[in-house]
Image (tube, rainbow, N blue to C red):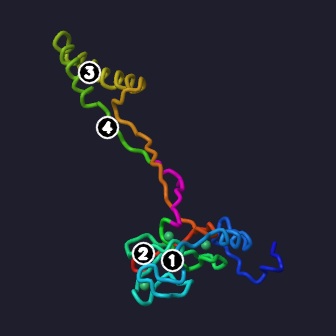
Amino acid sequence: MTTLANSNLPESSAAPAAATTGEIEAAAKKLVRRGDVAKCPVCGVGIDPDAYHCAKCRNYFCYHCRTRLLSTDTQVQCLNQECDYYAKLVCGVCDLPHDKEETPSVYAEPEDGYWPLWLVISVVVGAVTWYYSSFIVGALVAAGLHFGGGFGLQRCGLNIFGRERRVTHQRTSSFRTCICCKQTVKEVGPGR
Ligand SMILES: [Zn+2]
Ligand SMILES: [Zn+2]
Ligand SMILES: [Zn+2]
């Protein structure tokens, strides 16, 4: 649905929860930019109220709170052309990060069983049986104990022959939203 008032605006497809122009204007009215917007917060020279960079001292600063921005600081720009903060440099404290739960990654991790120890026990029991009986009986007892008993123990929950463990890794990512229009913003790298 397009009203007459904003029919000439471009359709924005990137915004998941696109605020209407009215909502943005209301938010912008509530937002009060801190400090003297007509002065550079670093050197104090008179500058354009829309600026976030001082031509005299060559410093960048947050458009909203006027904190000086070093190239290593987090700095973001709003991509919403309808927003008052569009393309303005804003610090990472004004445009706070939000955590987003990602689909957890699940993978199977092999877990070694206790079969070597179990083999030693089976062979010892087989050897003792061989001593009192015959080699054939001893071998049968050892094999029967190792495989039959081993599977029995495995079914009881003891890890004899190895198994796979399901490992779930919870993943989160973070994104920042514009202080004014609440849409996702672009993080600007240190080189700007
Ligand atoms: Zn300056
Ligand atoms: Zn700021
Ligand atoms: Zn914005």
Pick the residue in front: 13 or 137: 13
Judge from the rendering whether residue 77 lies leftward or rightward of residue 153; answer left or right: right
Q: Residue lying furthest left in this view?
A: 131
Give the residue at x 72% y 74%: 21
- Labels 2 & 1 near each other (Cβ < 8 A): yes
Q: Position of residue 165 (x, y in %)?
A: 41, 40
Q: Residue lying furthest bottom in this view?
A: 56
- Whereabouts is ligand 3, in terms of quadrant? bottom right
Q: Which mark is residue 153?
A: none
- For the N terminus, the quadrant is bottom right
| Residue under label 3 | 142
Sequence order check: which comes first, mark 2 or mark 1?
A: 2
Pick the residue in front: 65 or 6: 65
Q: Quadrant of residue 7?
A: bottom right
Judge from the rendering whether residue 142 lies leftward or rightward of residue 150; answer left or right: left
Q: Which mark is residue 112?
A: 4
| Residue under label 1 | 89
Q: CA distance from mark 2 to mark 3?
A: 74 Å
